[in-house]
Amino acid sequence: MVGLLRRLPIARGSWMRATPLAVLLGLLFVKVSFAQEGEPVTAELAYYAIDNMMLLVATVLVLFMQAGFALVEAGFNSRKNTVNILFKNTMDLCFGSIIFWIVGYNIMYGNDVFGGFIGWNGFGISAGMDAAEAGPGVLHPQIDWLFQAAFAATAATIVSGAVAGRMKVSSYLVYSVVLTGLVYPIAGFWKWGGGWLDQLGFHDFAGSLIVHAVGGFAGLAGAIVLGPRIGRFNGKRNPLPAHSITLATLGVFILWIGWFGFNPGSQLAFSGTANVSATMLIAVNTMLAAAAGGVFSILLAWFTEKKPDLGYGLNGILAGLVGITANADMVSNTSAIMIGGIAGLLVVGGMYLLERLKIDDPVGAWPVHGLCGVWGGVAAGIFGTANLGVQILGSLVYPLWSFVLLFALFSIMKAMGSLRVTAEEEKTGLDVVEHGMVAYAGD
């Protein structure tokens, strides 16, 4: 191994500055992968291995966010719907992965077939790449698909919390397939696939709008069409209590950790001084924005509610994370604190707005992901180097795209009588009615 290190054209002393463990692991991976083919181990192959392995680690963190969403949504809702929420989160990943493999990925990253609006490149994933193509910043199609599939599942799962407690499982699965197979991939193509918004210079680094606003406004559409849960608004504000703030808090911590795959992972290339520096900036900005979101939301809720409400603080943390996701690569640490803090204020205001409009969103999915997703896009033009006019345009288009399409889908299912469970079934709880089981043995 010492001889192998000496053969690589890397400046003396740079190993201590360029994540030595990752480099060594990358070299070992390259040694094993290419030794059988008799190819020399070069710096290009080492960087190729590092970039792809680090993206795999980031992908695992993003996938772990599914557990966070499941716990947050289950904790903030009634215990009689726990199994139902966990089922929907699980199936988002299962159904979403299959449909994103069949069509979604190639809509999102295919060749432009309709004036920058939609892409297409066949079904499934390309067979792979030859070793001769390997190099710094080059991603293997398999890991590229896996990372993007994790993002697609995240967008779908956001809606589960907004429609909790009253939506039929069958209709939810139809929605999940439509979003991951069509709505989200087309939205992603506009920017990440080189579509019309990308050509205008729109910036959404890791998906404040493409992932979170698309999911958040889909959730708002579902909540409006479904109507509130029984007893939620009886002529006045009547919050239905969370059954486990412990689960919700643990879920937020898991999401916070997973976001270090979501944001830094979106750098996509991790080898080389410039990429290392960019990744570290993104990671620190992510941390600071989340913390600021938690602080500012707690302070505002403390002032308005006369008590330090943990629920607002938890959503404030998530709001800060959503707000920094579009711009973490282009703003300073100070700006990240300001972006996260403003997101923390917005999420509290957004939750009050839903109360005033009598829209029942049990977990605050729209204030966190929809409203703060829009803020993240606009913030890239205010605090970053993106064109503010283009950022405002994109920050309007993505919510409209998601809301209009999903509102139509939910309305069609409602007209067919297949959207919402009956009042009696809702009172009994979806765990028993839809799944024939309970989450807790004593129930």
Image (spheres, rainbow, N blue to C red):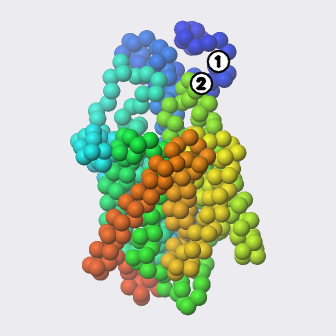
Left or right of 225 in this view: 74: right
Query: Which mark identifies residue 14?
Result: 1
Where residue 200 appears, x then y in whole percent?
41, 43
Instruction: Say which of 15 and 40 sits in front.
Output: 15
- Asked if the residue at tag 1 contacts the one at tag 2, i.e. Cβ–Cβ closer than 8 Å, the answer is yes
Q: Which mark is residue 273?
A: 2
Which is nearer the N-term, disc 2 or disc 1? 1
Figure label count: 2
Mark 1 is surrounded, within 10 Å at the Cα level, by few (under 14), some (14 to 19) or many (20 or more) other residues, namely few
Q: Nearer the viewer, residue 18 or 195?
A: 195
Of discs 2 and 1, which sits in the foreground? 2
Give coordinates of residue 240: x percent, y percent: 58, 80
179 above or below 106? below
Q: Which residue type does callout 1 highlight? A: Ser
**Residue occupying the point 51% across, 66% down:** 366
Which quarter of the figure is the C terminus placed in?
Answer: bottom right
In the displayed structure, 50 sits above or below 188; it is: above
User: In the rendered image of this protein, does residue 328 appear above or below residue 423?
Assistant: above
Q: Secondary structure at mark 1?
A: helix
Quadrant for residue 76, please give it: bottom right
Q: Residue at x 49, y 54 (%)?
A: 392
- Dot 2, how many residues are within 10 Å of its Cα: few (below 14), some (14-19), or many (20+)? few
Can residue 356 be seen?
yes
For marks 2 and 1, give the CA distance: 9 Å
Q: Nearer the viewer, residue 61 or 360?
A: 360
The image position of residue 255, as x and y in percent, is 58, 54
State whether residue 86 is above or below residue 326: below
- Circle 2 sits in a helix, a strand or a loop, which is it? helix
Q: Which mark is residue 338?
A: none
Residue type, numbered disc 2: Thr
Residue at the location (58% across, 43% down)?
384
